[in-house]
Amino acid sequence: MRRILGYFGYTGGISVWVDPDDETREEVVAGNQRTGVIGEILTDRLRDDGTEFDDAELAALGMDPAEGIDVAVMRGYTKEDAVAYCIAHNNPEAQGQWDFAQLTGNLSTLDAEGYDATLTAFDEAQLGKMLGSVPPAAPAGFETLNEQTVAVEHQCPKCGFEFSGKK
């Protein structure tokens, strides 16, 4: 997350709930991890590679030390609404599903251009699986089976054809 924010900048995703009974009471209800990472970046001013950001660079990334960051403000909602929103915001099932053909096509394009595809937040192993360079590993204890290793005796109920596998 830190690497992605340091590269692309802050692009949103933080929501703050304002208590309808006490407007001075606010809580981050979505984007807690981003809030923490942005706080670290603004405090230590370091990029992922250890070099230092200056104020202009941070401002260009949407993390202006003087101005702060933009957040979505949730007014007029109950605390229960805010909690439900937080759960929905973090529920991967509520975010929709990947179009894997499009995803792998886009990743292949990035790969062909020599782009650092880890900036997509997929790690090397995930990228390798999606791009076909790393076959998925079989689960532990999963043995390879084929007609030479499995004893199969079968007779087709319609035509009577008999099949016998070897073991």
Image (tube, rainbow, N blue to C red):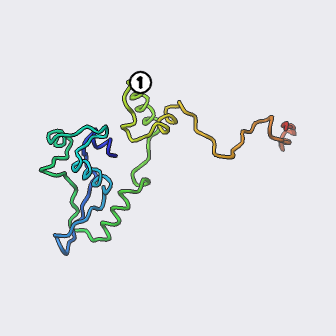
The picture places residue 156, in percent across and down from the top left corner, at 83, 41
Q: Along the horizontal axis of the image, is 166 left or right of 52?
A: right
Q: Secondary structure at mark 1?
A: helix
The picture places residue 55, in percent across and down from the top left corner, at 15, 42
Residue at (55%, 33%) from the top-left corner? 134
Residue ID for mark 1: 112
Q: Quadrant of residue 18?
A: bottom left
Residue at (28%, 52%) from the top-left corner? 13
The picture places residue 45, in percent across and down from the top left corner, at 22, 45
Residue at (80%, 34%) from the top-left corner? 148
Q: Residues within 10 Å of mark 1 (few under 14, many from 20)?
A: few
Residue furthest to the left in view is: 66
142 or 158: nearer the viewer:
142
Decide: is 40 above or below 22. above
Q: Quadrant of residue 54?
A: top left
Q: How many numbered marks have been drawn onto this rendered protein structure?
A: 1
114 or 101: nearer the viewer:
114
User: Could you tell me the amino acid type at mark 1?
Assistant: Ala
Decide: is 89 above or below 107. below
Decide: is 70 above or below 77. above
5 or 149: nearer the viewer:
5
Residue at (19%, 52%) from the top-left corner? 70
Residue furthest to the bottom in view is: 21
- Quadrant of the image for the C terminus? top right
Q: Along the horizontal axis of the image, is 52 left or right of 114?
A: left
The picture places residue 77, in percent across and down from the top left corner, at 25, 68
Q: Quadrant of residue 163?
A: top right
